[in-house]
Amino acid sequence: MKLQPIGDRILLKVEAAETKTAGGLIIPDTAQEKTQTGKVVAVGDDKDAIKVKKGDRVMYDKYAGTSVKIDGDDHLVVKMQDIIAIVE
Amino acid sequence: MKLQPIGDRILLKVEAAETKTAGGLIIPDTAQEKTQTGKVVAVGDDKDAIKVKKGDRVMYDKYAGTSVKIDGDDHLVVKMQDIIAIVE
Amino acid sequence: MKLQPIGDRILLKVEAAETKTAGGLIIPDTAQEKTQTGKVVAVGDDKDAIKVKKGDRVMYDKYAGTSVKIDGDDHLVVKMQDIIAIVE
Amino acid sequence: MKLQPIGDRILLKVEAAETKTAGGLIIPDTAQEKTQTGKVVAVGDDKDAIKVKKGDRVMYDKYAGTSVKIDGDDHLVVKMQDIIAIVE
Amino acid sequence: MKLQPIGDRILLKVEAAETKTAGGLIIPDTAQEKTQTGKVVAVGDDKDAIKVKKGDRVMYDKYAGTSVKIDGDDHLVVKMQDIIAIVE
Amino acid sequence: MKLQPIGDRILLKVEAAETKTAGGLIIPDTAQEKTQTGKVVAVGDDKDAIKVKKGDRVMYDKYAGTSVKIDGDDHLVVKMQDIIAIVE
Amino acid sequence: MKLQPIGDRILLKVEAAETKTAGGLIIPDTAQEKTQTGKVVAVGDDKDAIKVKKGDRVMYDKYAGTSVKIDGDDHLVVKMQDIIAIVE
């Protein structure tokens, strides 16, 4: 399945969150607050509004958007206003 | 019965959701979260706002729109803003 | 009594809903969800906004508008934005 | 006391509701849903917005406006948007 | 203390409400619904919005504005949109 | 600490409220409704919106703004729309 | 990790709050209301809206923005409208 977002919407692949504790232990994300970063997979057709591009890693508002599974991976369709920052 | 949506509204035929589990078993959609895809049956007269066309398969916001049965099939009249993405 | 709707309002005569069950039995509408169709009786003076005409059969948003009895029949004054589709 | 409504406001004299039952019996309005008609007594100074004139009998939104007694009679100051239709 | 309202605000001196019953008895206003009239004491500097002048007796929306005591008298600072009518 | 308000915001020094009763007794303000006056200490850079100047004594909406202590004194940063009147 | 805020958003490094009591005792901020100041680390690309610059120390609305840890330090991405004042 391939999704083409409409207008100022953006399709993100949600990133699996892994975190090292101070002792170096890796905790899977169910044990902590979910991170809010994703990779841009596709962008809508509203070129004036869209300020990210395919491949950008972005931070987004918690609870924003609509969840969708694509080929078993968690994705999210969010609006441009839900994108907070580009993670560099 | 034939419905002609008004303005930026779109008439969708809701898709029956079937899902294969990892083991290949098919679960009818009452046992899972309803998918949110439909096929565009008719579009309103607001040509500037409407960005999908008859035959497109689209994803829409959960709870959006007004349900209506046409010839026994579930349909939905949604506004353009409720269409999230085109499914290709 | 005759009502002349104002602005983008539309006066509808609500249709009595009758439904045949699979077995052909007719159920009066108190026993089921009320249908939301009506016939346009009069339209307001905002010609730019109004996109239906006298005699059209239309579908409207549940709970929209103001109920009024005219000569014993259920009518509804709704705004144009509450009209979802023309039923053909 | 004389009231001069401001802007797009309209002063209505609320009509006492009397209803004949099928058998011709008159029920005072406390026993039924209050009708929502009134006669236009004065209109505000916003001539572009005001689409009714002194003497018109109009239907208005339930709960709209501010009640005021003038010479013992129930009046209502409503905004133009609360006027639904002219009763002819 | 003297108050100069800002923008489209208006300073009113609230009128003490006295009412004669049918028998001529005067009831102090705690025993009835408070009237909503006041006298305009000062107006703001937004001359386009302000449509009342010092000395006008006006009716205003219940619960509108901010109460303030000036020299022991109840005053109210309201916005122009809270003024319903001029009482003549 | 010195605060420079941004946009249409205004920094006020909240006035301690003292009130003489009829008998001349002074009641500290915890025993009465808090007055809502303050002195303008600094104004934002939105010169078109700002209609008060440093030194003005103003009345403001109850609960408006953000409290901040500066050198032990209660201050408040409010928006211009929260300023009701200039106290003269 | 480096964050580049989008539009009128601003990345702040939240300041740890230390307060001297009258007796000179330092109280860690869990024991008092959290201060709301931070240092601007990066600003978005909406140059017209952004009125602070990297290095400014600013006060912001309580509860505004999205928290994020960068290299172990508390940061906050806020919108320009959440910035109340520049602390000088």
Image (cartoon, coloured by chain):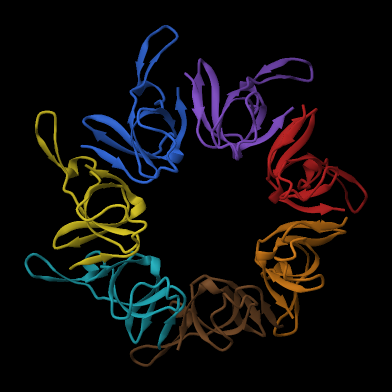
Chain colours: A red, B purple, C blue, D yellow, E cyan, F brown, G orange
- For this rendering, which residue is in front, C76 or D45? D45
Residue C51 % position (x, y): 44, 36
In screen coordinates, is G61 left or right of A52? left
Residue B30 % position (x, y): 61, 21
Q: Measuring 36% from the left and 12% from the top, which residue is drawn there?
A: C26
- For this rendering, which residue is in front, E70 or A8? A8
Q: What is the residue that sits farthest to the bottom in this orientation?
A: F24
Q: Measuring 72% from the left and 41% from the top, which residue is drawn there?
A: A45
Residue C77 % position (x, y): 34, 38
Residue E42 % position (x, y): 37, 81
The answer to whether one can see residue A61 in this image is: no
Q: Measuring 72% from the left and 85% from the top, which residue is drawn there?
A: G23
- For this rendering, which residue is in front, F54 or F36? F54
Quarter occupied by residue A39: top right
In screen coordinates, is A65 left or right of A13? left
In screen coordinates, is A40 left or right of E36? right
Q: What is the residue that sits farthest to the top in this orientation?
A: C23
Q: Measuring 34% from the left and 51% from the top, which residue is drawn there?
A: D82
